[in-house]
């Protein structure tokens, strides 16, 4: 009989302590009677931009839309090639395709699990226009080197920061290393709404203006279209909730980092590939993904002890059906494939207690003791 249950993430209990403040925000929005693109969105955009150290933030309907709108606002044309890592959540690739681009998948670096800068140059061709970097699991990619490569080859960088709220490298937030940093506020994220939401941050006020137009059908004013855009607006309720949660983000991220350190100490000496991080802040531990042999057996063992895990991601992007040609892969990304076969994410979220984490550590150690 299992007497512990440690869920991977329990959204039903996570925000109980915020209900009073969220209710206040809810009441404020309802009584104002303005539900799409109003003062809450404007205030959240200002607060989130300040948090990231960017000049502007533009609230949109999801992280996927943030990526599509960023690529469109930077002038992507049909068939333009977008270099992007083979390991990410599927929407990274979907956004490129929906924006009319062709994703060119590049392998990851085994330590950072982000795109490997050394493999980019061989993927650049005459149609390459963008480098879409993903700060995977919350770890900031090697932006100095990536910026150097992009500069040298005239590529525009877009950052997928869907997992990197509050992650910084060399004092700069994820998303401020390029012209457009794209965030998701999907409920499970480090800063999560109670529905879908997203934002693009930028220092370029012209680009922000274009993003605001593109998220709103392409309108230049109430009655006139300037171009064909989308309906992709952050709503007032989600913005008001995000304002409440943004005030806690640093504190939640501090707890995530503390838990990551505890995992690192507790799992030391086991045959596991643990996440690597250098500075205090360059990882915000959206996920604590490890690599190991016998991944499925380890997961079963943990499940038997009441511990839920997840896999991010079982399939690398270049092996998804829409990106095969004649049923065969077009790109060779062995490191991404290797990691997908070995990846397992352990529970890590701000409300995980030390005791719960100790139980996870003990159970993982127990698995290896039996081998
Ligand atoms: C790396 C990455 N990119 C993009 C997205 C897309 O965000 P959304 O679900 O808000 O569209 C996600 C979230 O699922 C993600 O993890």
Image (cartoon, rainbow, N blue to C red):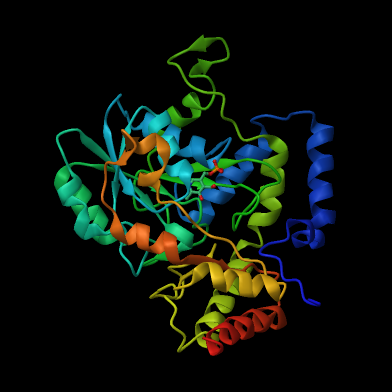
Instruction: Say above or below: 351 vs 99.
Output: below
Instruction: Say above or below: 223 vs 283.
Output: above
Q: Residue at x 24, y 36 (%)?
A: 129
Residue 215: where, in percent of width, then height? 52, 27
Task: State the residue lying farthest toward the top.
Answer: 223
Residue 59 appears in the figure:
yes
State the image quarter where residue 310 is shown.
bottom right
Residue 320: where, in percent of width, then height? 41, 42
Instruction: Say above or below: 213 vs 262.
Output: above
State the image quarter where residue 27 is shown.
top right
Residue 18: where, in percent of width, then height? 79, 58
Q: Nearer the viewer, residue 18 or 308?
A: 308
Q: Nearer the viewer, residue 93 or 350?
A: 93
Q: Residue at x 71, y 53 (%)?
A: 244
Residue 172 appears in the figure:
no
Q: Quadrant of the N terminus?
A: bottom right
Residue 368: where, in percent of width, then height? 53, 85
* Label total for image: 0
Q: Residue at x 65, y 84 (%)?
A: 358
Please state if 124 lies on the left or on the right of 336 as rendered.
left
Please state if 182 lies on the left or on the right of 104 as rendered.
right
Q: Nearer the viewer, residue 142 or 239?
A: 142
Please state if 270 lies on the left or on the right of 259 as rendered.
left
């Amino acid at each position: 009989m299992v007497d512990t249950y440690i869920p991977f993430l329990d959204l039903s209990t996570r925000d109980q302590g915020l209900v009073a403040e969220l209710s206040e925000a809810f009441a404020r929005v309802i009584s104002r009677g303005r539900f799409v693109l109003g003062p809450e969105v404007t205030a959240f955009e200002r607060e989130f931009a300040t948090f990231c150290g960017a000049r502007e933030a533009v609230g949109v309907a999801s992280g996927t839309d943030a990526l599509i709108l960023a690529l469109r606002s930077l002038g992507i044309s049909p068939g333009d090639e977008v270099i992007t890592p083979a390991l990410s959540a599927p929407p990274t690739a979907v956004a490129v395709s929906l924006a009319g681009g062709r994703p060119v998948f590049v392998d990851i670096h085994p330590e950072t699990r982000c795109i490997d800068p050394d493999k980019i140059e061989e993927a650049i061709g005459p149609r390459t226009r963008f480098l879409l970097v993903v700060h995977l699991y919350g770890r900031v990619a090697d932006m100095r080197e990536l910026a150097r490569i992009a500069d040298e080859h005239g590529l525009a960088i877009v950052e997928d920061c869907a997992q990197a709220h509050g992650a910084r490298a060399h004092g700069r937030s994820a998303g401020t290393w390029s012209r457009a940093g794209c965030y998701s506020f999907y409920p499970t994220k480090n800063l999560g709404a109670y529905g879908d939401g997203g934002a693009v941050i930028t220092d370029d006020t012209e680009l922000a203006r274009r993003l605001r137009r593109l998220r709103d059908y392409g309108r230049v004013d109430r009655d006139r279209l300037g171009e064909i855009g989308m309906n992709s607006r952050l709503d007032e309720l989600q913005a008001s909730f995000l304002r409440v949660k943004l005030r806690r983000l640093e504190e939640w991220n501090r707890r995530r980092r503390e838990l990551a350190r505890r995992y690192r100490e507790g799992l030391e000496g086991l045959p596991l590939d643990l996440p690597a991080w250098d500075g205090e802040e360059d990882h915000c531990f959206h996920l604590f993904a490890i690599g190991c042999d016998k991944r499925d057996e380890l997961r079963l063992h943990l499940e038997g002890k009441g511990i839920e895990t997840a896999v991010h991601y079982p399939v690398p992007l270049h092996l998804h059906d829409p990106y095969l040609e004649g049923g065969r892969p077009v790109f060779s990304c062995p490191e991404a494939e290797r990691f997908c076969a070995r990846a397992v994410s352990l529970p890590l979220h701000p409300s995980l207690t030390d005791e719960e984490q100790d139980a996870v550590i003990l159970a993982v150690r127990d698995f290896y003791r039996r081998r």
